Image (tube, grey):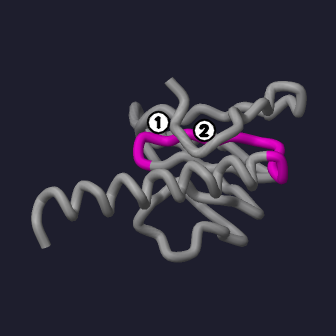
Amino acid sequence: MSAEDLERYETEQELALYREYRDVVGLFSHVVETERRFYLCNDVDLQVRGEGSEVFFDVRMTDAWVWDVYRPARFVKKVRVITFKDVNVEEIAKSDIEIPKGDSFPG
């Protein structure tokens, strides 16, 4: 497999992931971003925990979809993330979901 074939394959996989995201985003109420992953979910519980001067985040999600091109199954019943990095949680306003039509990436 040439480098060009590999790049074409990766581009096709990313486009397929974007299409899947476009199809499922309306099913979820929250977006959760961690340093490693992007999730869509219907329930999220974010707890700030600490021991001494160390603070970390304990994030639990149910009925989640994971933005990860390398996962064969992106729907997950329960997810738990423990991280020392920033976590962003947003509630999706249904009026905010305006996915562009067509098969190309935005921008």
Q: Is residue 55 magenta?
A: no
Depicted 88 relative to depicted 31: above or below: above
Q: Is residue 106 left or right of residue 95?
A: left
Task: Give yes or no for contact between labels 1 and 2 (Cβ–Cβ under 8 Å).
Answer: yes
Task: Return the x and y of residue 19 as percentages of the image width and height.
Answer: 61, 52
The residue positioned 44% from the left and 53% from the top of the image is 14
Q: Give the range drawn in magenta.
A: 26-36
Task: Return the x and y of residue 55 as percentages of the image width and height.
Answer: 46, 36
Give SS at disc 1.
strand
Q: Distance between the residues labelled 1 and 2?
A: 7 Å
Give SS at disc 2.
strand
Question: Which numbered circle lies on residue 48?
Answer: 2
Q: Is residue 30 magenta?
A: yes
The residue positioned 57% from the left and 75% from the top of the image is 73
Q: Is residue 13 left or right of residue 45?
A: left
Taking depth in this image into account, of 40 and 26 the one nearest to the observer is 26
> Residue 72, can we see it?
yes
